[in-house]
Image (cartoon, rainbow, N blue to C red):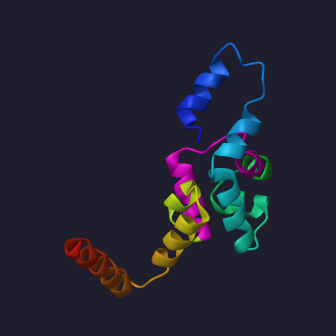
Amino acid sequence: MLSILHYQKLRQSKYSGIKYDYLLASTHPFPARLKQAREAKSLTQTELGLRIGLDISVASSRMNHYEKGRHLPDYDMAKKMADELGVPVAYFYCDSEDMAQLLMSFHNLSPEQKQRVLDFINNQLIKG
């Protein structure tokens, strides 16, 4: 997986004339996860942008840039999107479907259920 730092270094390197936006979109999970979460809530890009406080003049284009992988949001913006979409921020960064599904399943549990799962895992680790 290409890290954001690596991506930024590539853009500043002698290869900066090459479009690395495609590389980011194809290697970073954020764009696809954002689109999945948005579509699961049946929101348009504009609706999501407006709900997280973007101006109407940039809401659609900004969301489109995030979903195409042209730009990645900072943590605060990712948190706003996650809160609006009802997903944990970490969901956007899961690089496997299994981990994304596990994270969402855990996220949707009640606090008591979460504690039972954690207790179970801890007990399993102790048993070895």
Which residues are the magenta region?
63-85
Q: Outermost residue toward the top?
A: 14
In this rendering, the answer to whether 3 lies above or below 84 is above
Q: Outermost residue toward the left?
A: 126
Give 36 or 57, whichever is nearer the viewer.
36
Q: Residue 89: give x, y in percent of width and height.
A: 51, 59
Q: Is residue 109 left or right of residue 118?
A: right
Indicate whether residue 50 is drawn in magenta: no
Identify the residue at horizontal 70%, vertical 48% (top origin).
66
Q: Outermost residue toward the front?
A: 128
Observer able to see residue 62:
yes
Residue 122 figure quarter: bottom left
Q: Residue 35: give x, y in percent of width and height.
A: 72, 60
Q: Residue 95: give x, y in percent of width and height.
A: 58, 55
Give 57 or 121, whichever is nearer the viewer.
121
Identify the residue at horizontal 24%, vertical 71% (top origin).
128
Q: Is residue 56 left or right of residue 1?
A: right
Observer able to see residue 87:
no
Give 59 or 128, whichever is nearer the viewer.
128
Identify the residue at horizontal 57%, vertical 51% (top origin).
77
Q: Residue 44: give x, y in percent of width and height.
A: 79, 64
